[in-house]
Image (tube, rainbow, N blue to C red):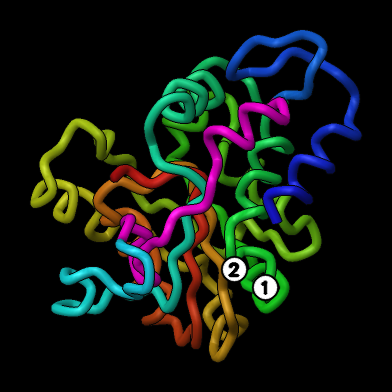
Amino acid sequence: MLRALIDRMTTALPSQCAVCRAWPAQTLCEACVARFAQPRPRCRSCALPLPEGVKHCGACIKQTPPLDLCLAAVAYEYPWSGLIARYKFGASPGWSQALALLMRSTPWAEPALDAADLVLPMPLSFERLRRRGFNQALELARHLAPGKTRNDVLLRARDTPAQSALPRAARLRNVQGAFVVAPGQEAGLRGRRILLVDDVMTSGATLFAAARVLRDAGVAHITGLVLARTE
């Protein structure tokens, strides 16, 4: 899968690598993908790194998250942490295709995308969308599954402080009631398979809160797919 990702990136038009700044290269050059995007064994429920052969972390065994499967392309560390910050806050939506290819290369991501009935991006509040100019999760989802992506099903009910600035307990409280299913969409979710897309997963509170809302609407299976996971 990693070899296929590299091959697809090297057939695109040349540019400057966003990681090593090599020129001419692709948005993510072959050397950087091979060096920094090697797959790691991860918890199947929350995508935390685990030793080889272990499927679930202790926390998920103790309390099962509302996701049936959780996948992460890379660790939220150098060079991806800085790259994602530039992508989101530096008005660089043009990187979406290359980053989505990185996500699609994640083990089990392609089958999960094929099996999903709908692909839903994590929504932004109106205030945050206005400041940022685009929803990075929506752009990633459109490149991952253009025919399945819907941004009118899962909505953000209220703006919340950034999760990164809060401790874990406060993160859980912060996202309570933050998401709703759009009126009239509940019937179309019952018994369906949904894939949720986001850029960064930290504690999992935001992704889990959205998944619980979808569970309450009758969704049968939920996969979370994120670009980066904090370790």
Circle 2/circle 1 CB separation < 8 Å:
yes
Q: Give the left or right position of residue 205, taking residue 222 as reference.
A: left
On residue 202, which mark appears? none
**Residue 39 is covered by the magenta coloring:** yes
Q: Measure the alpha-carbon separation of dots 2 and 1.
A: 6 Å
Between residue 132 and residue 203, name the one nearer to us: 203
Image coords of residue 82 (percent x, y): 44, 21
The residue tagged 1 is 111
**Residue 163 is covered by the magenta coloring:** no
Q: Residue at x 61, y 58 (%)?
A: 152
Quarter occupied by the N terminus: bottom right
Q: Secondary structure at mark 2?
A: loop
Between residue 168 and residue 103, name the one nearer to us: 103
Q: Secondary structure at mark 1?
A: helix
Image coords of residue 224 (percent x, y): 47, 63
Which quadrant of the structure image shows residue 69? bottom left
Residue 213, placed above or below residue 192? above
Which segment did they paint magenta? 28-50
Residue 81, placed above or below residue 208? above
On residue 108, which mark appears? 2
Residue 76, placed above or below residue 67? above
Between residue 76 and residue 165, name the one nearer to us: 76
Q: Give the left or right position of residue 188, taking residue 205 as reference.
A: right
Residue 31, placed above or below residue 113? above
Q: Residue at x 76, y 40 (%)?
A: 6
Q: Residue at x 59, y 31 (%)?
A: 134
Image coords of residue 20 (percent x, y): 60, 14
- Judge the density around disc 1: few (<14), some (14-19), many (≥20) Cα neighbours within 10 Å: few
Which quadrant of the structure image shows residue 125? top left
Image coords of residue 166 (percent x, y): 15, 37
Between residue 66 and residue 26, name the one nearer to us: 26
Q: Residue at x 59, y 84 (%)?
A: 192
